[in-house]
Image (cartoon, rainbow, N blue to C red):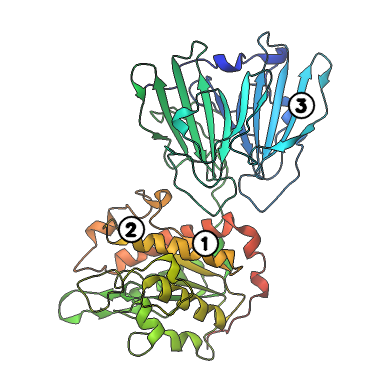
Amino acid sequence: MVVFTALLFALCVAAGVCAESAPQQIRTFESGTLTIGDVTGLDLNDIRTPGFYVWGSPFPAHSPISTDRSNPLYGTLIVTGNQQASIVYQLVIDFRGNLYTRTCGVNGWEPWSQSEKRITESAQSIDTYQDGMFTIGDATGLDLNDIKASGFYTWAKPFPAHSPIPFDRSNPLYGALIVVSRRDKTVTHQLVFDYRGNIYVRTWGAVEGWTTWTQAARGKNVVQEAQASTTEAQEAPSAAPAAPARPLAAKAFARVGCIGDSYTAGFINIGSKAGSYPECSWPHYMEALTGSTWTNFGVGGSSCKSWIEGGRYSGLDRVRAEGNKCQAYVIGLMINDSSPDKTTYVVLGTPADIGTQNDSYYAYYYRLILSVHEVNELAPIFCNTCPKSLSRYTGYNEAVRTIVAYCQDQGLPVYLCDLAGEAYNTPAYYANEVFTTDYINGHYTAIGYEMMAECYLRVMSDVMLDHISGFQNIHLIPYDKPQ
């Protein structure tokens, strides 16, 4: 792959703009071609090197926007300059798409000015700043292959074609794109980052066309790490300390209820003593990791349909039982529902089945959410997709995503834990070799279930932090203390 070797010709800037450089140590992406840094707690008046910057808390000094805890990507800054390198331009975007601009000349910094337009208003109208030198636009519903004008773009729904990141309802700033083109238009570089700070790069050439997207510095996060890298994951040296890891917010609950099948129940399928071992289940290991109570409502062989219909393969009566009210609930039901060779098979259905009595996964899953919600209306419900790679799960995973989105539109405290999503399909999570080597007769042993807990603690915490305003009432959510 051709990497970012072109200078920022389209920005017409040099690193020494305004005859002064930033005093802080900021790591660079592509050896200074484009600076990507974390300016948390710094001073925006000192940031004069052309590039793209983000920050968290504490906010940098002289920021035009105030602290907002509802989003992990608090603010973004673009710095450019004129061809003579005597003027510095700063443009700040908040996560709602509001734009703020200012200029530094011989008389110092001008006051911030807010633009009347927002970059997420229209995909058809693109505002150009600095006489076309840098474009700020909305790429919603467009094709990233067609965007070759140097600039910064964001998008919402519908996602643009040829995006390297999937649609995610959990954040209003779904994706962002930086485009750098050579002056002669023979080479274009695109850099996309998602709201978690993951970076993807590709290049277009007049002869070879677009290369495939490549994720740079997998596992690094420009918000958390202040870390930059080339596409070969070569890190530039810096004295800047790495930011701390994200908090394990899932520890905040006093009691969580786990609704699922044999994977939740801790079924171990080895020899004559095969059976459910709750003390080896992932909810048990969640208790060890969090210090909280994780009540295991798992029932081996169950499906969404059996949970609703009651009987031997339903744990709904236990969920409703006096003394079992939890502060949050987790639902992981799909494996038996999607098995066409089993009597537990439930036809997938369509989104039109949501809210009906139809005999389909869409209908039963939504009814189960409502049943759990009735037990404790304040308790958030976390719905899991299945990270297994078998194609049979694809439609059922999409059903969970669709149902969660529908519930959120109805104002229900329902959240998606997308275990099958790209963000968690890595060796650090569900692509870990443990899930292959410990897989025995369709199930895991204590080792595999413990790994599930290690992964889920971070996934659930990510979801909570990405929707932090929805979890700031945990201290008010009632629950029954276990006897």
Residue depicted at 82% across the width and 24% down the height: 110
Q: Is residue 166 above or below residue 369?
A: above
In front of the other: 54 or 306: 306
- Residue kind at label 3, given as amino acid type: Arg
Label 3 with label 2: CB-CB less than 8 Å: no
Residue 442: which disc? none
Q: Position of residue 447 (x, y in %)?
A: 30, 65
Which residue type does callout 2 highlight? Thr
Residue under label 1, please give it.
Answer: 405
Q: Real-space Cα distance between discs 1 and 2?
A: 17 Å
Q: Nearer the viewer, residue 410 or 47?
A: 410
Q: Position of residue 7 (x, y in %)?
A: 52, 15
Residue nearest the viewer, comparing 440 with 52: 52
Count of marks, rendered view: 3
What whole-number distance in Å separates the C-alpha atoms at marks 3 and 2? Answer: 47 Å
Q: Which residue is mark 3?
A: 102
Q: Closer to the observer: label 3 or label 1? A: 1
Q: Earlier in the sequence, mark 3 or mark 2?
A: 3
Determine whether the residue tagged by mark 1 lies in a helix, strand or loop. helix
Task: Report the side of 293 relative to 410 (left or right).
Answer: left
The three-letter code of the residue at mark 1 reads Ala
Q: Which residue is mark 2?
A: 394
Question: Is residue 411 rendered to the left or right of residue 257?
Answer: right
Cα separation, mark 3 vs mark 1, equals 38 Å
Residue 227 lies, with reference to residue 372, above or below; the image says above
* Residue 230 shows in the view: yes
Residue 386 seen anywhere in this rendered image of the structure? no
Density class for disc 1 (Cα within 10 Å; few <14, some 14-19, many ≥20) is some
Q: Residue at x 67, y 69 (%)?
A: 473
Where is residue 331 shown, x and y percent of the image? Answer: 44, 71
Outermost residue on the top side: it is: 84
